[in-house]
Amino acid sequence: MNMNNNGFQIDLQLDPSLGIIIGGNPFNCLTWMDKMGSSSKSGNKGIPATSRDGAPIELTALVKYCLDRVIKAYSNKCYPY
């Protein structure tokens, strides 16, 4: 309701040099923790109060957790790949 058209343009990609997912723009709320501005009076309507364009930390943390589990399973000889 408060997002402008640019907020719907979400291009996520893997940054091979960092190994993490990046993307978004200053008008996106990339995760559930981001708050979209809603006040025309204050001038923040359609602008996230907590914009974190770049790397959504929740996705990066999930990838790290999964990789840690796979590494542990491999070292315990529970996962042969």
Image: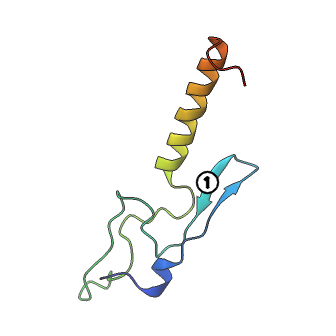
**Where is residue 76, by image quadrant?**
top right
Percent x, y of residue 4: 41, 85
Q: What residue do we see at 50% from left, 83% from top?
A: 6
Label 1: how many residues lie within 10 Å, few (<14), some (14-19) or many (20+)? some
Residue assigned mark 1: 21
Image quadrant for the N terminus? bottom left
> Closest to the observer: 21 or 50?
21
Percent x, y of residue 51: 44, 66
For label 1, the SS is: strand
Q: Is residue 57 above or below residue 78?
A: below
Q: Horizontally, is 49 left or right of 18 in the view?
A: left
| Amino acid on which disc 1 is placed | Ile
> Quick one: which residue is furthest to the right in this view?
17
Q: What residue do we see at 68% from left, 55% from top?
A: 14
Q: In this view, does 4 lie above or below 26?
A: below
Q: Horizontally, is 49 left or right of 71 in the view?
A: left
Percent x, y of residue 73: 60, 19
Percent x, y of residue 30: 45, 63
Q: What residue do we see at 61% from left, 15% from top?
A: 78
Q: In this view, does 21 lie above or below 3?
A: above
> Closest to the observer: 70 or 19?
70
Q: Is residue 57 above or below residue 80?
A: below
Q: Horizontally, is 4 left or right of 77 in the view?
A: left
> Closest to the observer: 4 or 76?
76
Image quadrant for the C terminus? top right
Q: Horizontally, is 47 left or right of 22 in the view?
A: left
